[in-house]
Image (tube, grey):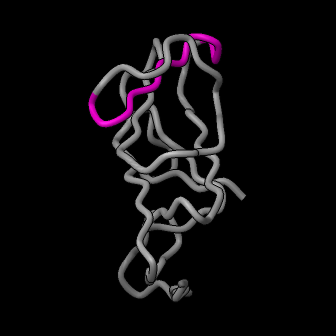
């Protein structure tokens, strides 16, 4: 399912990942979804620090590497998500982890 990059219950804008693994790699065919308050049709997207998509969709499949953020009217700007094209990655679940949690790792290449 969808996993936020910040702790559950946060009232900030968040980028959700599907599949829910980090670091995020382009060849995973990642869908970014902007979650926050306000009208979904008013979602603004930023790529590499520049406004990229004004009144864009709430979610999309990523086609390019770079650093992505979204903005929702009532909750502001999300933390960035970096999409790379690394050839080999050790991935962890894209959710808040606490000391003592059992964690599944994925080695992908």
For image coordinates 56% across by 11% down, the residue present is 55
- Give 28 or 75, whichever is nearer the viewer: 28
Q: Is residue 46 magenta?
A: yes
Magenta segment boundaries in residue numbering: 39-49
In the rendered image of this protein, does residue 101 appear above or below residue 63? below
Locate residue 4 relative to residue 75 in the image: left or right: right
For image coordinates 45% across by 32% down, the residue present is 13
Locate residue 50 relative to residue 5 in the image: left or right: left
In the rendered image of this protein, does residue 1 appear above or below residue 107? above
Q: Is residue 95 magenta?
A: no
Residue 32: image quadrant is: top right
Q: Where's residue 97, x and y in %?
A: 42, 72
In the rendered image of this protein, does residue 23 appear above or below residue 53? below
Q: Residue furthest right?
A: 1
Q: Where's residue 96, x and y in %?
A: 44, 64
How many marks on residues?
Answer: 0
In the rendered image of this protein, does residue 4 appear above or below residue 105? above
Locate residue 88 relative to residue 80 in the image: left or right: right
For image coordinates 36% across by 27% down, the residue present is 77
Looking at the rendered image, the quarter that the N terminus falls into is bottom right
Q: Where's residue 84, x and y in %?
A: 41, 60
For image coordinates 40% across by 39% down, the residue present is 68
Residue 80: image quadrant is: top left
Q: Where's residue 91, x and y in %?
A: 48, 78
């Amino acid at each position: 399912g969808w996993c936020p990059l910040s702790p559950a219950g946060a009232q900030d804008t968040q980028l959700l990942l599907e599949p829910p693994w980090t670091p995020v790699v382009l060849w995973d065919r990642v869908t970014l979804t902007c979650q926050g308050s306000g009208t979904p049709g008013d979602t603004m997207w930023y790529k590499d620090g520049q406004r990229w998509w004004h009144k864009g969709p709430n979610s999309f499949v990523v086609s390019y590497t770079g650093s992505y953020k979204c903005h929702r009217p009532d909750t502001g700007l999300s933390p960035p998500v970096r999409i790379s094209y690394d050839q080999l990655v050790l991935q962890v679940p894209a959710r808040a982890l606490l000391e003592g949690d059992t964690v599944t790792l994925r080695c992908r290449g």
